[in-house]
Image (cartoon, rainbow, N blue to C red):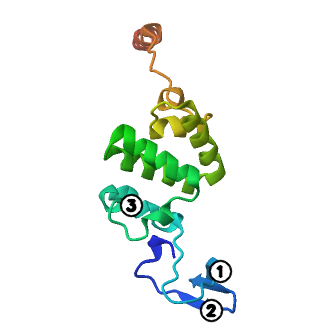
Amino acid sequence: VPSRLIGEKVIVRLHPTEVEVIYKGKPVERFPRLQGRGAHRIDFRHIIHSLVRKPGAFDGYRYREELFPTLTFRQAFDALKDSQGERGHVDYLQILNLAAKTMVIDVETALEALLEAGQPFRFSDVEALVTPDKPRIEELVAPLQPEPAIYDSLLEEEEVHHVG
C-alpha cells in the first residue's frame, strides 16, 4: 500500500484474483492477487516518497529491481550511475518520482531520447522534456520595476492637500 498509510488502519478484502485495500471507507488500491510463497509486487509509486527523502536506502533496498518500471528506466539508472557515480542514485529517484507524479510513458519517452543521444544527462534534463510548459520562477514573478514618478505625484498631492 502507499507509504502514507503506514500505521493507519485499513481493510483488506481478498478476492479470488485480486486484493482490495480500503481506507476510511473508500477503496484506495486494487491489484492482482499473487499466488505462491515468496511472491511480491512492489509499486514504486507507493514508496518513492520515502526513497527520495533517504536516497541512501536505495542501494540496499531488498526489492530494488522492482523500482525499474521498464528496461529503459534500468538503462537510465545505469547511465546515471556511470556518469555521476553515487549522485546518479539521487537523480534516478527524482526521475522515478517524476514518473509517479506524471505519466511513466512520458518519462520513458524522455529517457529514450536522452539515452539515444549518448550524452550524460541529469534529472533536470528529463524534467525539461516531460514538463516543457512548466514555468520557471523567473517567469512567474515579474521583476519589481518601481517608477519614481508615481512617488513624486504622491508628494505633490500631499502638498496640495495641506495648502487648502
Q: Quadrant of residue 71?
A: bottom right
Q: Residue at x 51, y 76 (%)?
A: 1
Q: Is the residue 64 above or below the residue 21 in the image?
A: above
Q: Eyeballing the image, is 39 above or below 112?
A: below
Q: Determine which residue is flagged by label 3.
A: 51
Name the element at disc 2.
strand
Rendered location of residue 44, percent (x, y): 51, 64
Residue 17 visible? The answer is yes
Disc with the residue nearer the chain's start (3 vs 2): 2
Closest to the observer, 146 or 12: 12
Front label number (1 vs 3): 1
Answer with left or right where residue 5 lies relative to residue 86: right
Image position of 92 with respect to 15: above or below:
above
Measured in 3D between alpha carbons, the distance from the residue under mark 3 to the one under mark 2, in whole angstroms, is 29 Å
Amino acid type of disc 3?
Leu
Q: Quadrant of the C terminus?
A: top left
Dot 3 crowding, Cα within 10 Å, few <14, some 14–19, many 20+: some
Task: Identify the mark nearer the N-term, 1 or 3.
Answer: 1
Mark 2 and mark 1 lie on one chain; the one further toward the N terminus is 2
Q: Nearer the viewer, residue 75 or 5?
A: 75
Provide residue 42's location: percent of width, then percent of height: 51, 71
**Residue under label 1:** 32
Q: Secondary structure at mark 1?
A: strand
Residue 103 visible in this rendered orientation of the protein: no
Q: Can you identify the residue that label 2 sits on?
A: 14
Residue under the point 36% across and 67% down: 61
How far apart in space, not on screen, are marks 1 and 3 (Cα)? 24 Å
Q: Secondary structure at mark 3?
A: helix
Q: Is residue 65 left or right of residue 51?
A: right
Instruction: Please state which of residues 163 and 147 is positioned toward the viewer in this rendering.
Output: 147
